Amino acid sequence: MRSFRKYVYAATLGLSMFAVQPTLAAAQDAHGSFTLAHEVHWQKVVLRPGSYIFTVKSFGPSDFLMLRRTDGTGAQAMLMAEGVETPQGNQVSRIVLVSRGGQSYVSTLQLPDHDIALRFVVPAEMALK
């Protein structure tokens, strides 16, 4: 009878460790909001002007950015970062835009408070001609 109780106790303890793990990982997700004054291309997604909420989630070796409008209109987007870096110096949180063919494209989302900078795919200047 004692060995059965020890087995149940060990199994319960083992399962409880798995139940705590997702909570710890979720606590590390970066999140925030921003407002766009004009239309912006973010990889293959085109975002209209307006306010957005974002969350950065890590799935294994990849980091994903989840976007949605604060007013609930429009589709949600999930974008995979091309690369992840550690911000240099005392940078502020910001979205870095580059201009290609008269359009704005997001190249980087810098989040120094979360010690992360996500890089995104931007078309080459020649690819747009």
Image (cartoon, grey):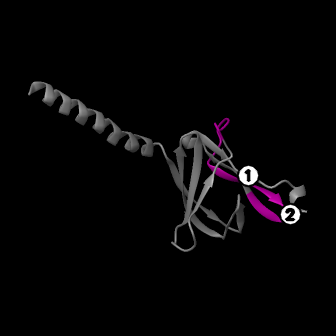
- Name the residue nearer the viewer: 22 or 69: 22
**Residue in view at x 61 percent, y 48 percent:** 93
Which stretch did the figure color magenta? 84-105
Callout 2: SS: loop
Residue receiving disc 1: 121
Q: Residue at x 20, y 29 (%)?
A: 7
Mark 2 nearby-residue class (10 Å; few <14, some 14–19, many ≥20): few
What's under tag 1, amino acid-wise?
Val
Work out which residue is located at the far top of the displayed protein and give it.
Answer: 3
Magenta residue check for 101: yes
Q: Quadrant of the C terminus?
A: bottom right
Q: From the viewer's perspective, is the residue at label 2 or at label 1 nearer?
A: 1
Q: Kindly indicate whether the residue at mark 1 contacts the one at mark 2 (C-beta within 8 angstroms).
A: no
Residue located beneath label 2 in the image: 101
Which quarter of the rendering shows the N terminus?
Answer: top left
Residue furthest left as drawn: 1
Task: Identify which amino acid the numbered label 2 is placed on.
Answer: Gly
Mark 1: secondary structure: loop
Quadrant in which residue 126 is drawn: bottom right
